[in-house]
Image (cartoon, rainbow, N blue to C red):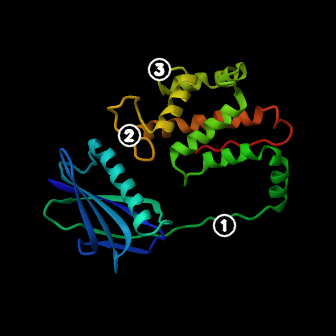
Amino acid sequence: MKVCYIYYFIEPIKEQYHDDGSTAFLEIDIPGTEYHYKASLLGTEDVPNMLRISISYVNEDKIPEISLNAIQSIKEHMFSTLRISYDPSLQFSKISLWNFIDKGNPPGLSVKLQEKYNSVPVNREIIKNNFTSTWENRYLIKLLTDGLNEDLPLYYRYLSFYRILEDSYKNNGKWDSEYDILLNKFNDQYISKEYSKLSISGYIETLRNRCAHGRFIFKKTDERGITQLDNKGLLELQEFMPLMIEIVVTSINSNKDTVGKFIVGLNRK
């Protein structure tokens, strides 16, 4: 039997991280049905720099699929708790690590992390032209950049994209014929990817409802994500996002209010 240790790093990122079992200043047992979970805060002088989630009784070097929702719930609830109890501006880094240790042995982590920053030269003329040409449509640009911002939750990004389509093609609660024309351009690609048996329009709407209500399936018995979809729903949404970006960018570039003013380049995220 093994114990799986999953590490989430609290910003700002340090250069060195070590865990030999001696740096945890808070440990909370969280009973599970098949596994035993524990949330631990690690750091120095009671200043947290890591959240460690442990899963006991793991049979192989693989995070059990049945544990994914529990891991997400523990992480999100600790994040919320730290924000209301310690620092309202606290952030977790995007970096996460995990390892597997034989049961009975202490945790073992020793890593060196380094953040890299890409230096992009400033083109003042491009910034000026883009600012002035998109001013009248700045709400669309705001929604687009929110949708492309990987620092925002995935459900929020999707809803930003959905709002672009809604503003462009929905009137009095009904989608107009131009919306069908737009989606038809991507129907073959949608079918080839086998995202769902639903039509492309039906699938876009289903994902919107899942994001808005935080549920993967609309049943009272379904487990909700705390602030977003569960892991299964997030994975499905993540897989569809590249096509959603193509649809939204094409929508903006063909919008009667933007044609001749600016063109948005396609970014696959």
Quarter of the image that includes the C terminus: top right
Lateral position of residue 218 relative to residue 176, left or right: left
Q: Name the kind of residue labelled 2 in the image.
A: Arg
Q: Nearer the viewer, mark 1 or mark 3?
A: 3
Secondary element at tag 2: loop
Q: Compare marks 1 and 3 and give the one earlier in the sequence.
A: 1
Circle number at residue 37: none
Q: In the image, what residue occupies the spot 73% across and 65% down?
A: 121
User: Residue 71: x percent and y percent?
Assistant: 32, 51
Query: Which image quadrant is residue 118 in?
Result: bottom right
Position above or below: 104 against 199:
below
Question: Are the residues flagged by discs 2 and 1 in contact, CB closer than 8 Å?
Answer: no
User: Residue 74: x percent and y percent?
Assistant: 33, 54
Secondary element at tag 3: loop
Q: Name the residue tied to disc 1.
A: 119
Q: Residues within 10 Å of mark 1 (few under 14, many from 20)?
A: few
User: Residue 19: x percent and y percent?
Assistant: 29, 71
Q: Name the residue tied to disc 3.
A: 197
Q: Residues within 10 Å of mark 2 (few under 14, many from 20)?
A: many
Give the Cα distance between marks 3 and 2.
23 Å
Secondary element at tag 1: loop
Give the Cα distance between marks 2 and 1.
40 Å
* Frontmost residue, 266 versus 28: 28
Q: In the image, what residue occupies the spot 30% across and 48% down?
A: 70
Position above or below: 206 against 62:
above
Q: Compare marks 2 and 1 and give the one earlier in the sequence.
A: 1
Query: Which image quadrant is residue 245 in?
Result: top right
Q: In the image, what residue occupies the spot 45% across and 36% down?
A: 236
Lateral position of residue 189 relative to residue 38, left or right: right
Q: Name the residue tied to disc 2.
A: 224
